[in-house]
Image (cartoon, rainbow, N blue to C red):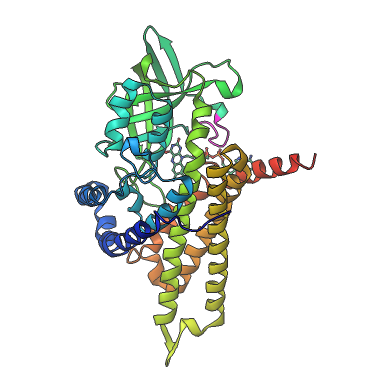
Amino acid sequence: MDFSIPERLAPVLREIHDFVNEVLIAEEPELLQTGFFTAEARLGALREQVKAKGWWLPQAPRELGGMGLSVLEHGLVSEVLGRSPYGHYVFGCQAPDAGNLEILHLFGNEDQKARFLQPLSRGEIRSCFAMTEPGTAGSNPTQLACTAVKDGDDYVINGCKWFTTAADGAAFAIVMAVTTPDGPKHGRASQIIVPCDTPGFSISRNIPVMGHRGEGWASHSEIRYEDCRVPRTNLLGEEGAGFLIAQERLGPGRIHHCMRWVGICERAFDMMCQRACSRQLDGDKTLAHKQLVQAFIAESRAQINAARLMVLDAAWKIDNVGFSAARVEISLIKFFVADVMMKVVDRAIQVHGALGLTDDTVLAFYYAHERGARIYDGPDEVHKVSAARRILRSYG
Ligand SMILES: Cc1cc2nc3c(=O)[nH]c(=O)nc-3n(C[C@H](O)[C@H](O)[C@H](O)COP(=O)(O)OP(=O)(O)OC[C@H]3O[C@@H](n4cnc5c(N)ncnc54)[C@H](O)[C@@H]3O)c2cc1C
């Protein structure tokens, strides 16, 4: 396995690192305090800078205007972007648009590509992905209740979804709905493109998460679909292929999420060390002189290094052996890296004392908004069970 930074990427990665540190992080306090809609114009201007430098859509193929990076290469970029909460958004590789872009590229027909994929890839519109429902267990989406019933040339969608990230202000949703209620477990549901101005599509609320309702891209909505009628031509891929397409969406996505979390770890780690070295306890003794704080630092460094190598290993396997062969590794990194991130952010907060709980640093933002990492894209427990079962199979 070769995890060295590819020659073509090394200088670009350094420049992106400087841009994140010198431009994004410098503007971050204001961007985070004003809320998404106020920040949107400034974020748009930053996106133009990124496009001009040729860094737009690092995850996407060149024919979509992207950088055409491999999974491992984009992972390395994702790590650097993770150092700022708006890093991925400014580079056009933010969830959920990155995943939607990928499945529209793979499964969309020509008309869907022209109407939805092209403007999405240019950053002119945003999108969302609606699978989870308040009334059914998201950990087992084969039980989905939201239906899409054929009526003439249309599908009529009825149901309630929640935690639809970035629905507020999105142009369209990709909705996972049951099209064949009596079909096989993994063939009941389909993915259907629903423009958000379709009658019957209504956002009931942006759900408050840890005290923050959020807005725009930085929010999670509850949405009602009441006799929401869209043409059958809005079906993505085959009818009943909803789960198959969802799997396709999640594979590389997990690498990008995990490397983003490694980036968050690195930022929190830097802040923890800087604070430890500068906070004086008595005389010329700082927090860095205390062995319990030194233990925080050594444990965090070991865990971040382990997490990073595990993700790069999984990315390398996807690039070289294929997604199927990397299923165990993908499950392992999903719960392992999320746990490391929570531990490192928590320690960094602890070292900052009361300051760590305020919005004067980015740590409290990460603590509140990244806790979901252990729940979305499959809770920890589901990934542990799935990895263990696959491992045990080889023991009979
Ligand atoms: C920040 C955030 C953003 C999200 N964005 C989106 C989005 O854009 N679109 C979307 O459709 N959904 C989104 N979700 C929803 C997410 O996918 C679901 O929350 C997730 O799938 C879990 O489903 P659930 O919340 O219904 O939990 P449940 O399925 O009710 O599970 C609850 C808990 O039970 C435990 N558990 C579950 N299964 C097992 C098992 N087999 N063994 C042992 N324990 C188990 C786990 O601890 C789990 O956390 C988001 C969630 C969060 C937190």
Residue 346 shown in magenta: no
Q: Quadrant of residue 366?
A: bottom left
Q: Quadrant of the C terminus?
A: top right
> Residue at the bottom extreme?
283
Secondary structure mostly seen in magenta is loop
Q: Nearer the viewer, residue 329 or 243?
A: 329
* Residue at far front of view: 7
Q: What stretch is highlighted in magenta?
A: 134-141
Viewer-closest of 315 and 363: 315
Q: Can residue 7 be seen in this view?
A: yes
Task: Point out residue 378 in the picture as x, y percentages from the top left corner.
Answer: 55, 41
Q: Is residue 48 left or right of residue 357?
A: left
Up-down relation of residue 303 to residue 383 (above or below)? below
From the viewer's perspective, is 120 left or right of 292?
left
Q: Is residue 256 left or right of residue 116?
A: right
Q: Is residue 137 magenta?
A: yes
For the point 39% across and 15% down, which residue is it? 155
Residue 205 percent location from the top left of the image? 34, 37
**Image position, residue 110 (x, y; %):** 34, 21
Q: Is residue 254 above or below residue 344?
A: above
- From the viewer's side, name the closer residue of 58 and 96: 58
Residue 372 in view: no
Look at 56% across and 78% down and name the residue there: 292
